[in-house]
Image (cartoon, grey):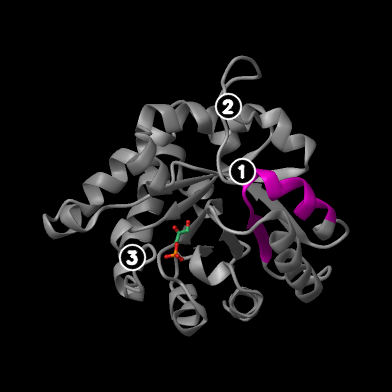
């Protein structure tokens, strides 16, 4: 497969800068300069700078968990793309279901952020996924389609290789319930065909689609073996060095 596996840790609202630096040290030590799989850590905003220093000189990359789609100004509590770039962030998670649920983020707002991040040379990780209610009502593919196309509105084909999609079924996040590899693959394949319809097969084949939702070393190999699963966006299992490094190892040996 020509797509490089990507393992991204979403630390969410966990780890002080000091604890984050310790975790990053463990990951940086494990990864070194090995680029067989791409590795990204996404600490909280206050830990970004410190983690950036820890991973400097290694293949581990830095991601943020959010940004505000304006250059600068009176937006109390928000963080700009320029600030993220200044601490050497390369990626930014956008449209996570927790932000959609607790902070009312809409597809239109997520789309603004996706376009803004691309303008500012940050690679967006666009999160999409259905709730349990929606899955049980048979609405999964419809929901995923609306969020995907809504999030990518106005994004040009030339920018698509920089975009990462994360399929995160909301019912699998932090619950210990994982989508079976077949369930996940079905949605990943549907996402790729939507991308192919919009951007052409060649471009769709280059876009990485991550799975997220209770991914851990015990289920990673099977998930990563699916044709359209190109890595993971990991919450709980990214907070501990051993389990995150085991996930990186699983991605290195996946094909
Ligand atoms: P968990 O791995 O804890 O289920 O979280 C997944 C997630 O939301 C990553 O963004």
**Residue 124: mark:** none
Q: Nearer the viewer, mark 2 or mark 1?
A: 2
Percent coordinates x, y for residue 220 in the rendering: 49, 77
Percent coordinates x, y for residue 100 in the rendering: 36, 40
Range of magenta residues: 38-53
**Mark 3 and mark 2: span between their CA atoms?**
29 Å
**Mark 3 and mark 1: span between their CA atoms?**
26 Å
Ligand 1 neighbours mark 3 (CB distance < 8 Å):
yes
- Mark 2 residue element: helix
Q: Residue furthest right?
A: 57
Position of 59 with respect to 208 (left or right) is: right
**Residue 172: mark:** 3
**Mark 2 and mark 1: span between their CA atoms?**
13 Å
Rendered position, 68 above or below 10: above
- Mark 3 residue element: helix
Ligand 1 neighbours mark 2 (CB distance < 8 Å):
no
Query: Magenta stretch containing residue 45, yes or no?
Result: yes
Say which residue label 1 marks.
162
**Residue visible at 65% across and 58% down?**
41
**Residue visible at 71% across and 47% down?**
48
User: Of the residues under marks 2 and 1, which one precedes in the sequence?
Assistant: 2
- Quarter of the rendering containing residue 77: top right
- Quarter of the rendering containing residue 162: top right
Position of 102 with respect to 133 (left or right) is: right
User: Of the residues under marks 3 and 1, which one precedes in the sequence?
Assistant: 1
Say which residue label 2 marks.
116
Q: Nearer the viewer, residue 102 or 213?
A: 102
Rendered position, 63 above or below 210: above
Q: Nearer the viewer, mark 3 or mark 1?
A: 3
Q: Nearer the viewer, residue 181 or 247?
A: 247
């Amino acid at each position: 497969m020509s797509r490089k596996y990507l393992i991204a840790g979403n630390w969410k609202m966990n780890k002080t800068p000091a604890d984050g630096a310790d975790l990053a040290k463990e990951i940086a030590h494990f990864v070194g300069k090995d680029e067989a799989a791409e590795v990204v850590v996404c600490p909280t905003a206050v830990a970004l700078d410190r983690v950036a220093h820890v991973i400097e000189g290694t293949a581990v990359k830095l991601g943020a968990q959010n940004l505000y789609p304006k250059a600068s100004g009176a937006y109390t509590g928000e963080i700009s793309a320029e600030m993220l770039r200044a601490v050497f962030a390369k990626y930014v998670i956008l449209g996570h279901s927790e932000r959609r649920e607790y902070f009312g983020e809409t597809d239109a707002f997520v789309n603004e952020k996706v376009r803004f991040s691309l303008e500012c040379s940050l690679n967006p990780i666009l999160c999409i996924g259905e709730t349990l209610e929606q899955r049980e009502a048979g609405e999964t593919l419809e929901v995923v389609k609306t969020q995907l196309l809504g999030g990518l509105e106005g994004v040009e084909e030339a920018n698509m290789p920089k975009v990462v999609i994360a399929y995160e079924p909301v019912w699998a996040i932090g619950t210990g319930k994982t989508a079976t590899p077949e369930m996940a693959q079905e949605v990943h394949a549907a996402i790729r065909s939507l991308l192919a319809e919009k951007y052409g097969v060649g471009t769709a084949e280059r876009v990485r689609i991550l799975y997220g939702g209770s991914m851990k070393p015990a289920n990673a190999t099977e998930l990563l073996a699916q044709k359209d699963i190109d890595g993971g966006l990991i919450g709980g299992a990214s907070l501990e060095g051993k389990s995150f490094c085991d996930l990186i190892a699983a991605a290195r040996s996946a094909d």
